[in-house]
Image (cartoon, grey):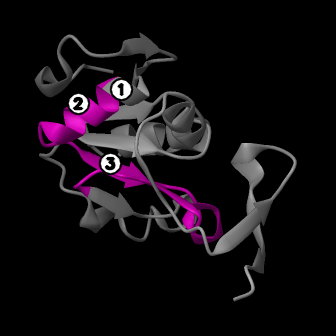
Amino acid sequence: MMKSPFFENYGIVSGGFLNVSPREALELCAQGAILIDVREDYLNAFKKFAVEHILYIPMSELAQRLAELPPDKPLIIADAAGIRSKEAVKYLSENNYFHIANLAGGMIEWERDGIKLIEDVEERLTGSCMCQLKPREKKKA
């Protein structure tokens, strides 16, 4: 994979794809990159990335919604742990998207690094690990 000039001096190439850290992703988003959250809706309802330019396109809908992604803009693909986003980066590169990077560690690393989130405190989540958090119940008023 050829590295986009926009991502010059950022990230590392691993597995054939550019991976950027959460702090690098935040800086790149401030410079105009668009964060693409490929988590399914039920996984992103509680915690969201707090960036100005973000699109929510679940991995299960990526092929059908490909036209919503601008091929000339830098895109950072994110998910819960950085695993499914790698699949999305591979798919996008196979479909002529070249200004792309994977958010290494996804939401787990973003939160661990203390980067701002948008949280829905009305929902209580449960799951065996953070990447599998699912809505359990609404907080009672």
Q: Earlier in the sequence, mark 1 or mark 3?
A: 1
Q: Quadrant of residue 26?
A: top left
Nearer to the camera, 117 or 133 = 117
Measuring 44% from the left and 33% from the top, which residue is drawn there? 103
Observer-nearest of 92 and 111: 111
Packing grade of label 1 (10 A; few <14, some 14-19, many >=20) is some
Q: Of the residues shown, which amino acid type is indicated by label 3?
A: Leu
The residue located at (60%, 45%) in the rendering is 80
User: What number is the disc on residue 15?
Assistant: none
In magenta, the rendered stretch is 24-53
Looking at the image, residue 114 sits to the left or right of residue 93; the answer is right
Q: Label 1 is placed on what type of residue?
A: Arg
Q: Are marks 1 and 2 in contact (CB under 8 Å)?
A: yes
The image shows residue 43, relative to residue 137, as above or below, that is above
Mark closer to the observer (1, 3): 1
Task: Answer above or below: position of 102 versus 139.
Answer: above
Going by the numbered disc 2, the residue's amino acid type is: Glu
Residue for badge 2: 27
The answer to whether 28 appears left or right of 86 in the picture is left
User: Where is mark 1, residue-wise?
Assistant: 23
Q: According to the image, label 3 marks what residue?
A: 35
**Place of residue 54 in the rendered image (x, y in percent of width and height, measured from the top left):** 30, 57
